Structure formats: structure tokens, C-alpha cells
Amino acid sequence: MRQQGKLSPTRLVRKFIPLHRDTSRFANWKPDQGSASDLQDAETRHAPGVPITLGRIGSLEVRLARKASEIRKAQELRYQVFYEEMSAIADGQTLASGRDADAFDDICDHLLVLDHDVPARTKPFGRRKPSIVATYRLLRQGVAERAGGFYTAGEYDIQSLLDAKPDLNFLELGRSCVLKPYRNKRTVELLWHGIWAYVLMHGIDAMIGCASFEGTDPNRLALPLSYLHHFARTPDEWRVRALDERFVDMDRMPAEAIDLRAALREMPPLIKGYLRLGAQIGDGAVVDHQFGTTDVLIVAPVASLNARYVNYYGSGAERFAA
């Protein structure tokens, strides 16, 4: 039996595994002053001018990660969901660390939902720390351009969209993850409240990112993929196509053959939520064999967001403000 307050050999090893994977692609990048993205030599990630808390509902709080240890916890949560619960395939380093990590973690902001009523671990005479129960990874365009690009560019030709909209400020959303007992309206609302506050804070004009269906056989996803192709595709001025070598046709059924209600029932909650928000879908899907998913591209211009949701969270993100 492990003595109270002592780390097991496995946890001791994991504690000192780096936060991120190979960061050579970002070797020449230096964060701007005041950025919340510098993990190299700063214990805290709280930038001047950034609110400590973005929102609260009861015991749940949404805010940005402020410490390297919080990013490790978010990576552990992602590992638990993507690798243990779902069907992602772990390489040796991922398996040893027990964390889902890549080079982008070093340059992104990490949005967290914490439960203050459920301490992550109680140490003898130590302070109770809230558990991280949900996370989102946020990458601003200015940071991505200095660092070498967006994660999404590995699946979609988003540069064409960036070039077509040079006056807009883009935000990439990714690695959405919620602990199973917290997959409810309250947690999702708090996540979106945090994203909306972040969008306002940084003057974001459009959000992009990949969202996933479980499974790597597009034929089994013919109904929801065809629904997205026929009824939710972006207009031409916002159209982004999957990279040629990864392109999977989403037009697998004629529009008249689609049962709209059945298609929506087969839609993952995250994608359904994006659609309700007013987001649209890029051209073509991408199969991600490592994560065991079929991905689609979400495109959400802020000016086109559903007015109902903007009014719900407030023009100044005041609904759940702490």
C-alpha cells in the first residue's frame, strides 16, 4: 500500500516527463510579452490584464490554466478520455507519461473547468485543489503565425481562408474534452461561456477547428456526413477543403434520401452544439487513425453566430461572470 503523501514510481516518472512532445518546429518562436503561453521558465501562466476567473456556476469555475502543473492535469484528462475511454492509439511516450501531449500544447492557451467541491488530491496538511473536469485548447492566429501554423493545417488547407480574409483575427479550437460524469448542460455552458469571454478579450473574428466522429470508416457515417455536406457546408467565401492526400468525400447520400432527424441523432454532441451555435462545415472529412476518428472542419464567423446564444451569454460575457 502506498504511503499517504508519497508518489508511486509510475507517478514519479510521469511527473518529470515534459509537458510537450518535439517542439523543434517552434524553435525560433518567442512569446510576446504578456502572453499566457510561455511554459518554459514561468510557473504561472496568468497574464497581466487577463481575468483570474472567466465564469462560475456553483462549484464549477472556468478559467485559463495558470501553471504548468494544471496543463499536465489537462493532458492527463485528455489521455483518460481519448486513450482509455475512446480508441486513440498511444505510442510509447504517451503510454509512459499517461498524458495526451504534443508540441502545440506549448504555444496554446488551455481553457479549464474546475470543480471546487471535488479535490484532485489531498496531501497531509496541504491545500485542497479543485479537480480539472473539462478542457479546451485555444490557439490565436498571431501566436500560430509566429510559431509555424495551426494544428488544423495538418488536415485542411486553411491558409487559403486566412489569405482570403486578411483583416480577420482567427482562433483555433481543439482538444475538447469533458470528464464523463460532467458531460451535462452546466459544464458545456461554462466551457462556451469561457470561449466567448476569450473571443471578446482578444477581438476574435472567426473560430476554426476540427471536430470528430468516433470511428474511421466513413461508410458507417454516411448519414451524418452527408447531412453536413448538403445542409451545413460553408458558403464559397468561407470554403476550406481537406488536403488532397487526406480528403474523404462527405457526399455519400443524395440530399433527398437523408432523414434529417435520424442524421441529427447520429451527430456527436459537440458537432451538434457547433451547428446550433451557427457554425458551418468545411469541404471533405479526414480520417485520423491515431485517434480512431473521422474529422470535419468547423468554421464559425463571430458575426454569423446565432443571436440567441450571443444574447444568452451576454455581449460582454456577463451571464456567468464571477
Image (cartoon, rainbow, N blue to C red):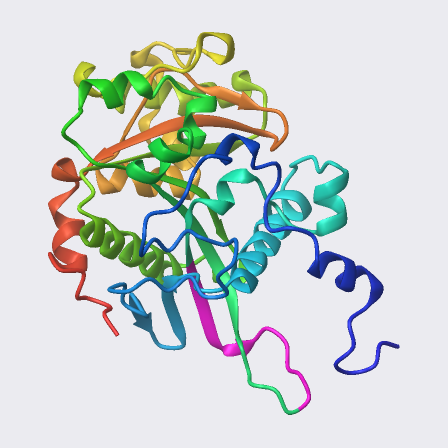
Residue under the image location 35 percent in, 56 percent down: 191
Q: Where is residue 108 in the image (x, y as percent from the top left)?
A: 42, 46
Is residue 116 covered in magenta?
yes
Chain part drawn in magenta = 112-124
Q: Residue at x 50, y 13 (%)?
A: 246
Q: Magenta stretch mostly in which secondary structure?
A: strand
Is 104 left or right of 111, judged from the image as shown?
right
Residue at (46% x, 18% y) in the render = 222
Q: Is residue 166 above or below residue 88?
A: above
Residue farthest to the right, as pictured: 1
Q: Is residue 36 left or right of residue 134?
A: left
Image coordinates of residue 127 in percent, x first then y, are 56, 85
- Is 287 located above or below residue 68 in the figure? above
Residue 319 as seen in the image, left or right of residue 36: left
The residue nearer to you, when weighing 178 against 255, is: 178
Q: Position of residue 25 (x, y in %)?
A: 52, 30
- The residue at 70%/43% (across/down) is 94
Q: In what quadrant of the picture does the N terminus appear?
A: bottom right
Q: Is residue 137 magenta?
A: no
Relative to 296, say whether 72 is above or below.
Answer: below
Q: Position of residue 272 (x, y in %)?
A: 35, 39
Which quarter of the rendering shows the C terminus? Answer: bottom left
71 sits left or right of 153 in the view: right
Q: Nearer the viewer, residue 285 or 322?
A: 322
